[in-house]
Amino acid sequence: MAEYKSDLLIIGSGPAGYTAGIYAARAGINALIVAGAQKGGQLIRSSIVENFPGFSEALSGYDLMEKIHQQAINLGVKIIDDEITEVDFYDHPFVCSSASGNSFMSKAIIIATGASVKWLGLPSEQKYIGHGVSSCATCDGFLYRGKEVAVIGGGNSALEQALYLTNYVEKVYLIHRRHSFNAEHVVQKRIFENRKITIFWNNVVDEIIGTENPLEVTGIRIRNVKSDKKKYLDVSGVFVAIGHHPNTEMFRRYLHLDSGGYIVVKPQGNATDIPGVYAAGDVCNPYRQAVIAAGCGARAALQAISEL
Ligand SMILES: Cc1cc2nc3c(=O)[nH]c(=O)nc-3n(C[C@H](O)[C@H](O)[C@H](O)COP(=O)(O)OP(=O)(O)OC[C@H]3O[C@@H](n4cnc5c(N)ncnc54)[C@H](O)[C@@H]3O)c2cc1C
């Protein structure tokens, strides 16, 4: 058990957390990152990233986050492999405790705990994440140029991902477990008018099928929830778009969260309702892109530094 004291505690080691750490270290602030269970954040699950500036060749999410991690280390950022389990924002300096029994006292805190993708929960889905299974059409759509893909979900995000994918692919199968969409009328209209999109109502995905070496998706088996009839669809990509849940449960009693559970930050910045507590990245931002998370991390750090 250790007691850490810092001027700035950063919770999370994704693009937002690491970037906040880099800015704090360069400003000479005594900052500490607690990395959490997924060191490097969600992006380490991405097999290829080509929309993060600074790299003329695409690289894997793991390699990208390793480079950012190394950059932070080189600048002197202290990173602790631990997970925050409890926070107390009532007293100042703030005190957080961790899964390993450590305590962290800090004058300011940046929450960069990200948002987790809601997956279907199939073992075959987990196996092919980053190898044909994705949660982000904007990130991975280009990989499926000229191919056939499936999008799972029936909300705005699923429909928008399906529409976005039609810019690249030959065909999108939109699989929805209900008989109507829960999305804006105008988006639904575009879906119904798009000839590249075929909708399978009342269907769920039973299995994702693929090859072993290399790991690649070749199809899905869907099941009609009313008739129990099964059908096989040849697809190279599966986009799971059934939602995200921001990792904010621990902060609920202190901070204002919106209806989706995201931390509400003040306009023009990353400050929360509590002075000295900031939020950055996917935990407060619906765009869910690494470069935006990194930008938010930089802004949160600059704001925290100026208000210390
Ligand atoms: C498969 C996949 C592919 C993607 N591809 C791309 C892409 O090509 N381009 C792109 O721009 N974006 C992509 N994204 C989205 C991108 O990964 C996210 O937008 C980005 O990682 C968000 O950064 P973040 O720092 O806000 O949060 P995250 O990356 O989610 O990091 C959250 C961090 O918080 C930590 N944490 C959580 N709880 C605690 C706790 N209690 N205590 C301590 N630490 C905690 C976690 O360990 C993690 O380190 C992809 C996402 C996925 C899932």
Image (spheres, rainbow, N blue to C red):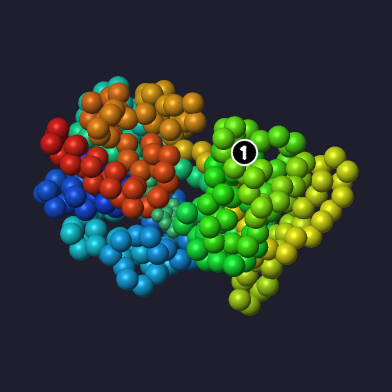
**Measuring 14% from the left and 45% from the top, which residue is drawn there?**
29
Looking at the rendered image, the quarter that the N terminus falls into is top left
Q: Secondary structure at mark 1?
A: helix
Whole-percent x, y for residue 131 in the image: 57, 66
> In the image, is the residue at mark 1 within 8 Å of ligand 1 by its beta carbon?
no
> Which of 281 and 50 lies nearest the eye of the viewer?
50
Count of numbered tags: 1
**Measuring 50% from the left and 45% from the top, which residue is drawn there?**
116
Residue 50 appears in the rendering: yes
> Which of 27 and 291 lies nearest the eye of the viewer?
291
Residue 17 appears in the rendering: no
**Measuring 26% from the left and 51% from the top, which residue is drawn there?**
19
Q: Amino acid at mark 1?
A: Lys
Residue at the disc numbered 1: 189
> Which of 5 and 122 lies nearest the eye of the viewer?
122
Whole-percent x, y for residue 39 in the image: 40, 55
Whole-percent x, y for residue 308 in the image: 14, 34
Whole-percent x, y for residue 58 in the image: 39, 69
**Measuring 59% from the left and 67% from the top, which residue is drawn there?**
146
**As displayed, is residue 213 above or below residue 251?**
below
Label 1, residues with CA under 10 Å away: few <14, some 14-19, many ≥20: few
Q: Is residue 23 left or right of residue 264?
A: left
**As displayed, is residue 238 above or below residue 269?**
below
User: Looking at the image, which residue sits at the far bottom?
Assistant: 213
